[in-house]
Image (cartoon, helix red, strand yellow):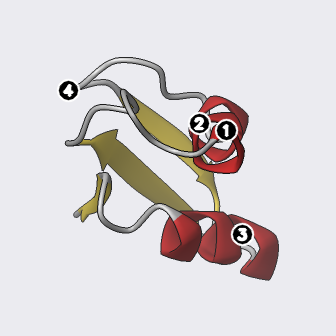
Amino acid sequence: MATITVRQTGSPIRRKKDQRATLVGLGLNKQGRTATHEDTPSIRGMIAKVAHMVEIVE
């Protein structure tokens, strides 16, 4: 299955708790960290929820 790599670009400080939890669910907790996941609709939904704090790395 295809994979997708995500890099955190924004800080979770002063964000809602559910957005912080989404970052933790993606395996991110500090700016500049990357995580690789299978490209599934649930992961895409998590990325869409915190799109202002992450970027997809090619």
Given contact means CB atoms under 8 Å apart, are the residues at marks 1 and 4 in contact? no
Report which residue position mark 2 lands on: 20
Q: Is residue 37 above or below residue 8?
A: below
Q: In terms of sequence position, does the residue under pointer 3 or pointer 4 come before the other?
A: 3
Residue drawn at x 46%, y 42% is 15
In the picture provided, is 54 more to the left or to the right than 46?
A: left
Q: In terms of sequence position, does the residue under pointer 2 or pointer 3 come before the other?
A: 3
Given contact means CB atoms under 8 Å apart, are the residues at marks 3 and 4 in contact? no
CA distance for labels 2 and 4: 15 Å
Number of residues whose C-alpha sits closer than 10 Å to that of mark 2, classed few (under 14), some (14–19) or many (20 or more): some
Residue drawn at x 67%, y 38% is 17
Report which residue position mark 4 lands on: 32
Given contact means CB atoms under 8 Å apart, are the residues at marks 1 and 2 in contact? yes
Q: In terms of sequence position, does the residue under pointer 2 or pointer 4 come before the other?
A: 2
**Kind of residue sitting beneath label 3:** Met
Residue drawn at x 39%, y 34% is 14
CA distance for labels 1 and 4: 20 Å
**Kind of residue sitting beneath label 2:** Arg
